[in-house]
Amino acid sequence: MSTAYSRPATLVPLLLFAGLLAVPFVAQATGQPFWTSFFTRILIYAIAASALNVALGFGGLVSFGHALFLGLGSYAVALPAAHGIDSGWVHLLISLGVCSLVALAVGAISLRTSGMSFIMITLAFAQMGYFLLVSLKQYGGDDGLAIATTSRFGAGIDLGASPVLYGTAWVLLALLTLWVARLRLSPFGMALRGARQNARRVQAIGLAPRRVQLAAFVLSGAICGLAGLLLANMNAYASPSTMAWTVSGDLIVMVVLGGMGTVFGPVLGAVVFLGVEELLKGYTEHWMIVFGPLIVLMALLGRGGLTGLLQRLHKPAAAGPVVQAIQKGHA
């Protein structure tokens, strides 16, 4: 095995993806379908966290409104289904189109500010979306909307079937992770990270940092909408609560816990966050009291997130600058 693939920061995520792929087979063999459902949820939130990482980790955009796109993606399935439209392609086009346009509008307005103002504006838009859906009484209001027909893409691909949904979520997460790995080292990715670190320098070399960040925000919102589409099919239900600010907060914690601006960090963060949550629920009804400090402790001990912790486990002796540069590229 090569040095690159034997490093914990690379080996652990690869083993994690292999383990996630095996989950439905193990669940079926052991007669425990719950685990397929639970890990489907993990995959979906890992997609949403990876999407947020493009804006937050690479672009430095602390968005407290990404739950808005998760909710829009869910209702892109629920509303057409309420009118008898079960075509997955229609759901997909609506999700991508609406989330992209809304992200463009939210980003264009929010990026005129920075810091706490940016956070509050993104939060305000998410709350607007929440109250808009609550006001739609004909579509369930705050009770949400049951989905009678899930997304069907033809050729036997129905996201209402648990194995199909799980496989689709796994493939999407794997492709998204590969794309993020390429994005991180691409000219666009470097410009985005540069805009996060020093916007004036990026502007000095002829680039428009705000446009770069806006593009990242739109991409992030559109991908988060895909996670919402999958979530609606998993629950066969869409609810305004998906847009709650606490959901946005959970996504931010997943990204920070796993490692902002890293390739695998959001995936690791989603697995640990939801895994610890489920574990504590089985022990006490007051699990939130334990969960909060535990997550804070993990974040403090793992500087740079879990990915940073894994990277520090591998410290080759006398590594030259070329080797260090290669290792950073694989992180």
Image (tube, rainbow, N blue to C red):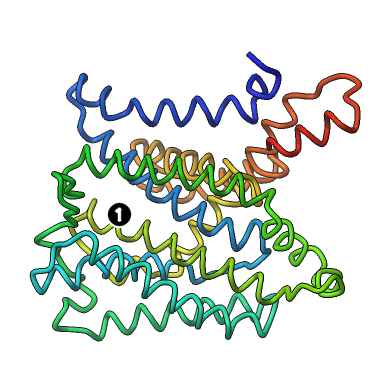
- Residue 28 lies left or right of residue 324; in this view the side is left
- Say if 97 sits above or below 310 in the image: below
x%, y% of residue 34? Answer: 23, 35
- Residue 124 lies left or right of residue 265; in this view the side is left
x%, y% of residue 330? Answer: 68, 35
Report the quarter where the N terminus lies.
top right
- Say if 311 sits above or below 172 in the image: above
Structural crowding at the residue carrying mark 1, measured as other residues with C-alpha within 10 Å and reported as few (<14), some (14–19) or many (≥20) = many
273 or 70: nearer the viewer: 70
- Say if 70 sits above or below 43 in the image: below
- Residue 140 lies left or right of residue 172; in this view the side is left
Please name the residue shown 17% across and 83% down the image: 137
- Say if 207 sits above or below 287 in the image: below
Check disc 1 and report its element: helix, strand or loop: helix
Q: Quadrant of residue 128?
A: bottom left
Q: Residue type at mark 1: give it.
A: Leu
Report the quarter where the C terminus lies.
top right
127 or 15: nearer the viewer: 15
x%, y% of residue 119? Answer: 60, 75
Please name the residue shown 37% across and 80% down the image: 129
Residue designated by label 1: 230
135 or 326: nearer the viewer: 326
How many marks on residues? 1
70 or 277: nearer the viewer: 70
Please name the residue shown 34% across and 65% down the image: 242
Q: Quadrant of residue 203?
A: bottom right
x%, y% of residue 223? Answer: 44, 60
- Residue reaching furthest to the top: 1
